[in-house]
Image: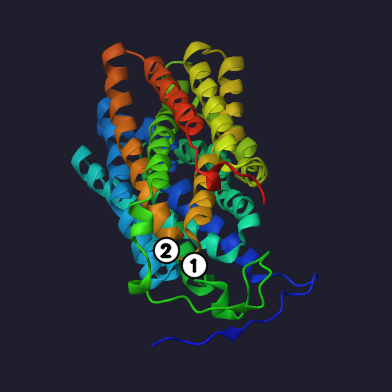
Amino acid sequence: MRMSERPLQPDPAPDRLHYAWVILAVGALVVFGALGLARFGYTMLLPPMQGDLGLDNTQAGALATANLAGYLALTVIGGALASHFGPRIVITVGLAVAAVGMLLTGLAESFGAALTWRALTGIGSGASNVPVMALLSAWFAQRRRGLAAGIGVTGSSLALILLGPLVPRLLAYYGQEGWRICWFGFAGTTLALAILALIVLRNRPADVGLRPLGASGEVARNVPAADGLHWGRVYRAGVMWHVGLIYVAFGFSYIIYMTFFTKYLVAEAHYTPAAAGRLFMTMGWVSLLCGLIWGWISDHIGRKGALIIVYLVQSIAFGLFALWPSPTGLTLSAVLFGLTAWSIPAIVAAMCGDLLGARLAPAGLGFVTLFFGIGQALGPSAAGAVADAAGSLGPAMLLAAGVALLGAIGSLLLGHRGVTGGRG
């Protein structure tokens, strides 16, 4: 049954907070749980987990791959479910599943068990992170979409800032069981965020009688039922396949760097866990505004130009980690990566909203995240195998640098007007 248009409330007065900012704040916290704790927490816990469970680098990479394979399994279906049922419920359930996966990871006594529960955690992460990023497209008008997505991804930075100093202290205090205690804490925090998301999030501005922040229209049309959506726009558009292929490069390269960051510092650069944690935290502080800055830049110079610059910077960062393993080189690498860390997901999320519109954006982001997830799933295992064969993680970091450079080249070849154009 077709529903009629309904008038919207005027935009809040300047001294009143638009509910879009509340959505954005909770969205950043969802990213904090879904990625910051569920994925990047593993970076800090890898050395003690590896020692306690007796894992080599290939197996350590396989645990990360299992997590990312679970994430991959939910990218397309998670986006489609969010388009059909609404992001709020899908995000809530996803966070709850991730919390259960982290709890069981902390109880694992073998490689096989850890592999299974890291995969379950990835499933929950994919079900929550993809829809929450796409949700921002519904709450913010196109000219503010990149900025909003950039703020949303700062949840990952908050996790790095928190985990850098906290995890080494917990590991020192609890000893051999410290990594398990950390996973239990991550699980409890993520479950609390699931409850918060259920209470606060709303699927679209019209649900509370508002326009998207920055929109100029006076009325909002109720969105058609899911069976009226033109799904073929997502899967048949050549530009979406191109964006997906570019996204592979980010998934493959950055996850190698993030997965083995602490392990490389401790095992090969002779950092103490506390010193490695401080550099991890530094990277978090530097990355705190990267999504916001690059989202804003992409709003003005275009998504294509922003992607090219970011990929080049990350290629340099990964190369420095391998080729200049001194405190100066490693710090410069961490700072360069931090300046761009979460910018590519923010730019891609905004790009999907630009190309497909707010209602199809979750499905579009899910589609391109499938490619991203393939890159993520392949990266850690490939890097672990390279490291075991070479006897060093340096060649794995060079592999990441080369793939990031391919991402820059792929971005240069983007030609769609909606992607290359800046603010209009």
* Mark 1 closeness class: few <14, some 14–19, many ≥20 residues within 10 Å: many
Horizontal and vertical percent for residue 353? Answer: 51, 56
**In the displayed structure image, the side of residue 8 where residue 226 appears, left or right:** left
Residue 123 in sight here: yes
- Give the amino acid at mark 2: Ile
Q: Which disc, if any, is residue 91?
A: 2
Quadrant assignment for the N terminus: bottom left
Q: Secondary structure at mark 1?
A: helix
Determine which quarter of the picture holds residue 335: top right
**In the displayed structure image, the side of residue 25 where residue 265 appears, left or right:** left
**In the displayed structure image, the side of residue 172 where residue 210 appears, left or right:** right
Horizontal and vertical percent for residue 58? Answer: 26, 26
Residue 60 in sight here: no
Horizontal and vertical percent for residue 118? Answer: 30, 46
Residue 235 against residue 223 in the figure, above or below: above
Q: Tell me what residue is drawn at x 49 percent, y 22 percent.
A: 318
Check whether the beta carbons of the residues at disc 1 and disc 2 lie within 8 A of each other: yes
Determine which quarter of the picture holds residue 165: top right
Circle 1 sits on which residue?
A: 197
Q: Tell me what residue is drawn at x 26 percent, y 14 percent.
A: 389
Label whose residue precedes the other's in the sequence (1 or 2):
2
Q: Tell me what residue is drawn at x 32 percent, y 18 percent.
A: 387
Display colour scheme: rainbow
Q: Tell me what residue is drawn at x 31 percent, y 47 percent.
A: 72
Q: Nearer the viewer, residue 27 or 246?
A: 246
Q: Nearer the viewer, residue 142 or 15?
A: 142
Horizontal and vertical percent for residue 231? Answer: 34, 62
- Give the amino acid at mark 1: Ala
Q: Secondary structure at mark 2?
A: helix
